[in-house]
Amino acid sequence: MVARPPAAARAVGVVLAGGASRRLGNDKALLSLGGESLAERAVRKLRVLCDEVAAADGGRGLVPGVPSLPDGPGRGPVAGLLGAAAAYPERALMVLACDLPEVPEVMLTALVIAGRMARGGEADWVVPRWGGRLEPLCAIYQPAALAALARRAAAGRFALHELDDEPGLAIEHLEESEIALFGDPPKLFINLNTPDDVARWRRGT
């Protein structure tokens, strides 16, 4: 059983499920394994930690019984994040993209703990970092980070990883050595973008 930090319960769990899935050829959020769609899988994981969970799915209603959020300004994941920020103002968002199916609940808990232990108080953005890259679609966004994203979107800047250079934000990274406690990082963060990705995931390789 995953321990449930109080800070996680207060955050809103947000499943990012609004992508166009152009490289895959069909809606990845509806891909299923064992009768559960990728969107439902992500909702289930976030519900372990968060009292409230919503789907940033462009208002398509992909997961019954879960609030379906329209996009905000911008494009791509930024639009989904800003739509969630508008629906839940001044709330922290624990974000998990539906196409990251192997992220374990215990690593989401580790993000919360890393954010709370940040120097100077709770971090504005807590994001995994491994192999020289960030995983901004599995992260915790506090209101200050979401406000920075809104400013960037208004200026036509939609690259989430560039938030790492935002002046004034308190940023905490969950480092590769910490991620490795939960498994092999490339497997934990397998990203389903193409039919080959899906086939490899289904094979468990």
Image (cartoon, rainbow, N blue to C red):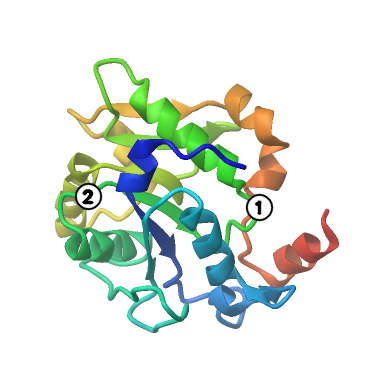
Quadrant of residue 38 within the rendered picture: bottom right
Q: Mark on residue 91?
A: 2
Residue that appears at 66% across and 45% down: 188
Residue farthest to the top, as pictured? 119
Residue 201 in the image, given as x and y percentages of width and height = 76, 61
> In the rendered view of the protein, which quadrant contains the N terminus?
top right
Q: Secondary structure at mark 2?
A: loop
Which of 100 and 53 lies nearest the eye of the viewer?
A: 53
Foreground residue among 22 and 47: 47
User: Considering depth in this image, is 147 or 196 the residue closer to the camera?
Assistant: 147
As drawn, 81 above or below 33: above
As drawn, 35 above or below 173? below
Left or right relative to 61: residue 132: right
**Counting other residues with Cα less than 10 Å from the Cα at mark 2, is it few (<14), some (14-19), or many (20 or more)?**
some
Closer to the camera: disc 2 or disc 1? 2
What distance separates the C-alpha of mark 2 from that of mark 1? 26 Å
Q: Quadrant of residue 33?
A: bottom right
Given the image, on which type of amino acid does mark 2 rest? Answer: Arg
Whichever of labels 2 and 1 marks the residue nearer the N terminus, that label is 2
Image vertical order of residue 15 relative to residue 112, above or below: below
- Residue 145: numbered disc: none
Residue type for callout 1: Glu
Q: Give x and y (percent) for residue 130.
A: 57, 32
- Image x and y of residue 114, in percent: 43, 27
Number of numbered discs visible in the structure rendering: 2
* Crowd band around label 1 with a 10 angstrom C-alpha radius: few (<14), some (14–19), many (20+): some
Q: Residue at x 29, y 65 (%)?
A: 79
Q: Is residue 157 left or right of residue 62?
A: left
Given residues 192 and 96, the one toward you in this image is 96
The residue where tag 1 is placed is: 102
- Residue at position x 65%, y 74% from top? 36
Q: Can you tell which quarter of the image residue 67 is in?
A: bottom left
